[in-house]
């Protein structure tokens, strides 16, 4: 695994829908892309951090600075035995796992392409398609919520997740459950509540939700454990699990029963696999979360989702929901709630360079 050169690009894509969560409204996505070149092949990754630190602490600007000044100089011109050895070379720095993951994930894609095998195979996954649901943003009212749910249920999605916030929680859930008594339904609060809202959150127990995602603070485990003790519905942790150690502690203290596993949030594929394994040891299901990814991040998510303990549908829905034109050439489309794993070496997808050049805000080459 020799790293000869790197390309760093940033594209800004308008979203096809207005995505409102408890932390704000998104109408576009700024996506940093990293291409690592070595041995005549290239590996590609996509950053999932946002422009502003709303979801977690990382930002696009911070990631670009770290990549340019700290991470890329440590791998350019070097040879590594495998992606895990390359990850070790990035140093034992604090946090910034999404930025690190850009290098680590590009290295996995590069390595899989060098070996000529699909990324899923290299990670140990066996599925050829993965079950997916959708994450629906906060809508204007109950009727709009039920409409949005209906459209996605009709498309075959295997789970509907509704974004909620204080003041908009029981209403959309009740309306949706009345219209669809049998669907697999979940909610995601993105850290909008505190323990003072326990009664409100307990009221959600009446709606047969598969889980309640990240109700409390982004960096909390202890209050989640207190809340879980007072709820029937399993809590699902997203923001507050950044490593396999976090997953172990969370499950050990009963902070939840399910993990939303986002590969970049935990620092890359190797750590994601360790989170997957810890959860499996505790008998806790995981599912693959999303960060409104472009095609590169989406493809990485699909490959990771082929591991056996991804037993609940993920958020990796069809690319055409998000973008008029994607950054890759291949369509990533689910049918009947099943997303096919792209075939071929690595992630199995290729950059649409013509399109990327037309919308790029940053295009840089880095050499040793
Ligand atoms: O909390 O899962 C989340 C998007 C951006 C940031 C955080 C989250 C999300 C989603 C969207 O829920 C999932 C997707 O469709 O990619
Ligand atoms: Mg979430």
Image (spheres, grey):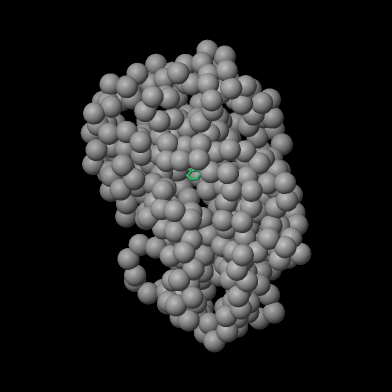
- Locate residue 197, reporting x and y percent: 28, 27
Q: Is residue 96 above or below residue 36?
A: above
Q: Is residue 149 left or right of residue 52?
A: right
- Locate residue 115, reporting x and y percent: 65, 71
Residue toward you, 153 or 356:
356
Residue toward you, 326 or 128:
326
Q: Is residue 127 visible?
A: no
* The C terminus, quarter of image: bottom right
Q: Is residue 305 above or below residue 190?
A: below
- Locate residue 290, reporting x and y percent: 53, 46
In the rendered picture of this protein, how many numbered marks are placed on residues? 0
Quarter assignment of residue 158: top right
Q: Is residue 261 left or right of residue 110?
A: left
Q: Is residue 178 visible?
A: yes
Residue under the image location 76 percent in, 64 percent down: 354
Residue under the image location 52 percent in, 74 percent down: 82
- Locate residue 136, reporting x and y percent: 55, 33
Q: Is residue 44 left or right of residue 238?
A: right
Residue under the image location 37 percent in, 55 percent down: 57
Residue under the image location 42 percent in, 36 percent down: 22
* The N terminus, quarter of image: bottom right
Q: Is residue 91 left or right of residue 229?
A: right
Q: Is residue 347 above or below residue 164?
A: below
């Amino acid at each position: 695994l020799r790293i000869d050169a790197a390309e760093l690009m940033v594209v800004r894509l308008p979203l096809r829908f207005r995505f409102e969560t408890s932390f704000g409204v998104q109408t576009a996505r700024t996506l940093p892309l990293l291409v690592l070149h070595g041995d005549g092949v290239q590996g590609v990754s996509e950053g999932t951090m946002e422009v502003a630190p709303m979801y977690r602490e990382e930002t696009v600007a911070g990631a670009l600075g770290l990549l340019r000044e700290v991470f890329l100089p440590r791998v350019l011109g070097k040879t590594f035995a495998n992606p895990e050895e390359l990850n070790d070379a990035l140093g034992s720095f604090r946090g910034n796992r999404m930025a690190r993951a850009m290098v680590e994930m590009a290295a996995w894609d590069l390595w899989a392409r060098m070996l000529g095998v699909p990324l899923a195979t290299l990670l140990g996954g066996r599925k050829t398609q993965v079950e997916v649901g959708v994450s629906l943003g906060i809508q204007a009212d109950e009727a709009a919520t039920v409409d949005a749910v209906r459209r996605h249920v009709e498309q075959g999605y295997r789970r509907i997740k509704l974004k909620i916030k204080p003041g908009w929680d029981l209403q959309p859930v009740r309306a949706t459950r009345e219209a669809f008594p049998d669907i697999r339904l979940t909610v995601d609060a993105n850290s909008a509540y505190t323990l003072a809202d326990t009664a409100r959150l307990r009221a959600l127990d009446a709606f047969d939700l598969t889980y309640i995602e990240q109700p409390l603070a982004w960096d909390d485990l202890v209050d989640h454990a207190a809340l879980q003790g007072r709820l029937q519905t399993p809590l699902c942790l997203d923001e507050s699990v950044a490593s396999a150690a976090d997953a172990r502690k969370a499950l050990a203290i009963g902070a939840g029963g399910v993990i939303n596993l986002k590969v970049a949030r935990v620092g890359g594929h190797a750590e994601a696999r360790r989170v997957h394994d810890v959860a499996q040891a505790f008998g806790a299901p995981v599912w693959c979360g999303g960060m409104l990814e472009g095609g590169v991040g989406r493809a990485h998510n699909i490959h990771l989702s082929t591991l056996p303990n991804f037993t609940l549908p993920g958020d990796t829905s069809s690319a055409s929901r998000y973008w008029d034109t994607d950054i890759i050439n291949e369509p990533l489309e689910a049918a009947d709630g099943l997303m096919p794993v792209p075939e071929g070496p690595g992630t199995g997808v290729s950059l649409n360079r013509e399109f990327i050049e037309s919308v790029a805000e940053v295009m840089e080459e880095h050499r040793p």
